[in-house]
Image (cartoon, coloured by chain):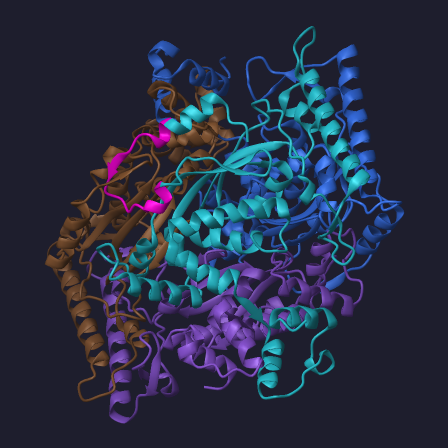
Chain colours: A blue, B purple, C brown, D cyan
Amino acid sequence: MPLTQDQLAEIEAQRGQTTPTLRATAPGMENRLYTAHPVLDHGLIRVIDYMGDDAAICQAARVSYGTGTKSVSNDEGLIRYLMRHWHSTPFEMCEVKFHVKLPVFVARQWIRHRTANVNEYSARYSILDREFYIPAPDALAAQSTVNNQGRGELLEGEEAARVLDILKTDAARAYDNYEAMLSTEGQKGLARELARMNLPANIYTQWYWKTDLHNLFHFLRLRADVHAQYEIRVYAQVMCEIVADWVPLAYKAFADYRMGGVNLSATAMDCVRRMLKGETVTQENSGMSAGEWREFEGVLGSG
Amino acid sequence: MPLTQDQLAEIEAQRGQTTPTLRATAPGMENRLYTAHPVLDHGLIRVIDYMGDDAAICQAARVSYGTGTKSVSNDEGLIRYLMRHWHSTPFEMCEVKFHVKLPVFVARQWIRHRTANVNEYSARYSILDREFYIPAPDALAAQSTVNNQGRGELLEGEEAARVLDILKTDAARAYDNYEAMLSTEGQKGLARELARMNLPANIYTQWYWKTDLHNLFHFLRLRADVHAQYEIRVYAQVMCEIVADWVPLAYKAFADYRMGGVNLSATAMDCVRRMLKGETVTQENSGMSAGEWREFEGVLGSG
Amino acid sequence: MPLTQDQLAEIEAQRGQTTPTLRATAPGMENRLYTAHPVLDHGLIRVIDYMGDDAAICQAARVSYGTGTKSVSNDEGLIRYLMRHWHSTPFEMCEVKFHVKLPVFVARQWIRHRTANVNEYSARYSILDREFYIPAPDALAAQSTVNNQGRGELLEGEEAARVLDILKTDAARAYDNYEAMLSTEGQKGLARELARMNLPANIYTQWYWKTDLHNLFHFLRLRADVHAQYEIRVYAQVMCEIVADWVPLAYKAFADYRMGGVNLSATAMDCVRRMLKGETVTQENSGMSAGEWREFEGVLGSG
Amino acid sequence: MPLTQDQLAEIEAQRGQTTPTLRATAPGMENRLYTAHPVLDHGLIRVIDYMGDDAAICQAARVSYGTGTKSVSNDEGLIRYLMRHWHSTPFEMCEVKFHVKLPVFVARQWIRHRTANVNEYSARYSILDREFYIPAPDALAAQSTVNNQGRGELLEGEEAARVLDILKTDAARAYDNYEAMLSTEGQKGLARELARMNLPANIYTQWYWKTDLHNLFHFLRLRADVHAQYEIRVYAQVMCEIVADWVPLAYKAFADYRMGGVNLSATAMDCVRRMLKGETVTQENSGMSAGEWREFEGVLGSG
């Protein structure tokens, strides 16, 4: 994450200057503001702004005139209740804005979350930097043989070296040719909106991304999950740490009910009840398919 | 707008205490925060929180590391450009949260704007206050004879008195009966979620309502417009004043391009071009229907 | 649900005339089209149009050139997989449009689901009919003493009679006065957009409501649930029956994973694992609050 | 657009079989269904399904029991009125679903329109085809010297040849290496979700994309506009032709009020009024910046 001296100076300047405000302020988030949290080899996440704190969730749930806080233990109980019973609107009353630098193939997954506001750096208007994601050795995995959209063992030795060489060489050549096509030395120079088509999906882009806490939790549940692709999961994990500092009570409820929580189907729940009564339940008498049964055993920790 | 002593004290407390923040701060909005701006006879609008300022719009448009401000005149030019060319995403990077008290029939129009977050006071859970909107004499208008969804002349004398008497008497009786049904004195007491069905549409409700600046502008363009119903327009007008203090450059561009701006159809634009060449254009040779022509004349100020 | 002769004739006409189409057609839904399904005392639900069927969900999931159907058993497995793993986008590829007549206080709950398209009958523009929801005896319940937003025992005898009398009398008088204010006999007549404020929340309104299958499932999970208010739940239940005819495989997966499914927190899941190992788990050693433990016992069927 | 024999057979099969339906049917759209409309060198647009027609817009606007059609001329007047006065909800009552094959850099612009449903072919799960967009000679343009996000003159001769050679060669090599990394011959084979990062932005992807008519019009206004990038504009233009066949009255109103319509700011409208009174208005006394004045002259056709 090679920030330039100018960029570091801009961040420094932003962190150096406080203003008094009447608004709700979250100390844990003030500590995070503007700082570049590194992700992957050249990526970053920065908090640019936020609105609200744990108390703001309660204040909205109560539609109150004041701050909505009665006591921390009251607030914690209310927040857990809201989370448990899927009352999502009070969580929508907190908002956060991030500056994110990320590879294009990650951006393409990310953007599928539609309830958010986005301003992306425009490669129609500007020239992209020469920065590409090249996986670290412990991220260079083979195709899974059991899961069509997953990874298996790590690549090793010669194969790993060959792959890294391809990724680096192709990226370098694509960028060299991008520059060559754009160049106006002795030629007209191709339009930026066309030249960019030569760039591979591991080039870095960046955007401002703003969303509310409810939709952020939905994003994090899917993208910090073990089934998410590693390259987006690391972004989600950094965001989890940031959110834990911002709204500690809400994050704790989220971790318990959503991230760590489990959905059991009517059929699966029926099996649990039978097992608790001492019955021996197997896939054959469970009513589940082989795949569902395997997932069920995983959840019970009995697989 | 009879706030109780407790409510006033809560507002006072909120306004009394500043905290240092690293976030973008809008001085014009800090002045507005928490204060109850009265609307209609018992309604109010309060700003509860906000995110961003004029510079934040530019910062997002530039996807910049720093504050995004180059100079005020640069920022103003960029904001006008963005507004003129319908680049809406940078305006989405500002967010605002209001506490609003409003009659139910106004709330029903308001909620049709879907891109917003809402927490409404629940009449399933709580008991509503005895507060009803009764129009002031200058809002007591007859049905328009030319516009099915508009108002004509003011009602006067006996008819006005009769209408006010009906509205007051029916509201009072409905509320008395609401209380009588809820009462647990010598009876079980009807469920709140049922008893509320007896209350008329001029009873006041309240909610927290949060939206981004782009969607707020869309709301204001439709609801501060002269064709909007008076009872929602007065809320929109107060919000216009608040937004003008919050993001003065963006509001000015909005006022010029949206509120004061005009949409001309291809047909109408063609008429303008012909008129500028000296041709006499009438409804007959305009290609417009009588209704469209009337609106066109209104826009030209030649009607 | 007293449809007029004209309305019945219009429905009859719509049901009488088929056209050949190349589109995916769901036989179970063709049987439902246009017919008025009665709900409450004067309400109704009618299917006006639909897009897609079970195969369309698979077709979209596979981004296929053809119909996407391989075999019914393949499709069922895929649909269950998509539902289990929260792959919501293929379900968004089906769409349905309803005509609904419903009391205003039900409409106010319903509209909180924002991802839908709505056209409501306008009381600014038109005059509402004299139709009010009056609860049947088995829906006339007292306020719950344990749940602030729920119902307890039924009202009986004199109290029930008194409540019904209030609801009927107040509705009748409110409507009489609505008409009196609107009347242009010997007076100007109040604007419709003002007169409507006198009408209570049990008056019927109607709208066209269109949404996709994913968002409809979300609506049904919340509104067909036992905790939903009875007056909206009966609408949701009728829609469940309709959806079961339209997309039988998707509905079955929804019933198993969502309607009948259960969310267990990390803490609760840990308790289940401990119980399956033979440990005696009580509220005290569960890590749950009293309220959560009660809900947990309810889920296990051991409460 | 080299469809395989299997794909053509599947399309043929879909077009060969009609079913009777009670739903509203648009003859112009039935003619379009399933057929692959070619776009660019390997792209396509196919209509997969639709809901509603011109009459359905009126039916929703009237919240009617029957079909909503009174007469074609009545319907046309109503549709024009709705479009002119920004009554968008009736247009949301029509829905359409497309199958689109498009280069990734076009897909990235397209997806910014959030109010739509999307299922994209997954390169995590599947292997992409070897198909790349290579511009035709008349699309190979230089960077504009006056507009940062636009094109200028065409490239010619040697420069054009060099660019085409780069694009073809780099695409071929990137794809060869993609296959080499995926290969399991004598090696483990890189995970698909990683290998895809080597592919450039001109590779083709495909998706199912579903939206309502109001949001489609918004998309078309921005993307069929002369300022849109050529490579997305050609998709928008094909969709315009399809929509004109589907809902001819709505499309005509859209073409007049939106596509061909003009937004004038309060300042610009004031200048028009002054000019119509015979005053000589120049940039200096117009109140507009140089850029705005140039655009204004363009609109008046006097530039």
Q: Residue furthest top?
A: D186
Q: Is residue A77 left or right of residue B93?
A: left
Determine if the magenta segment contains residue D16.
yes
C83 or D294, nearer to the observer? D294
Q: Where the C terminus of chain B falls, by quadrant? A: bottom left
Q: Nearer the viewer, residue D231 or C267?
A: D231
Residue A99, above or below B224: above
Given residues A125 and A11, the one toward you in this image is A125
Residue A16 or D250: which is nearer the viewer? D250
Residue at (50% x, 65% y) in the render:
B219
Q: How many marks?
A: 0
The residue range painted magenta reads D13-30
Up the image or down, B209 lies above or below A165; here it is below
Percent position (x, y) of residue C128? 23, 67
Percent coordinates x, y for residue C162 in the rendering: 14, 63
Question: Compared with residue C273, is residue B123 higher up or lower down, i.e. above or below?
Answer: below
Question: Per the image, is D184 magenta?
Answer: no
Name which quarter of the figure residue C250 lies in.
Answer: top left
Coordinates of residue D27 in the picture (x, y in percent): 32, 45
Question: Residue B152, image x and y in percent?
Answer: 34, 84
Q: Is residue A237 visible?
A: no
Q: Tell whether C297 sits left or right of B6.
A: left
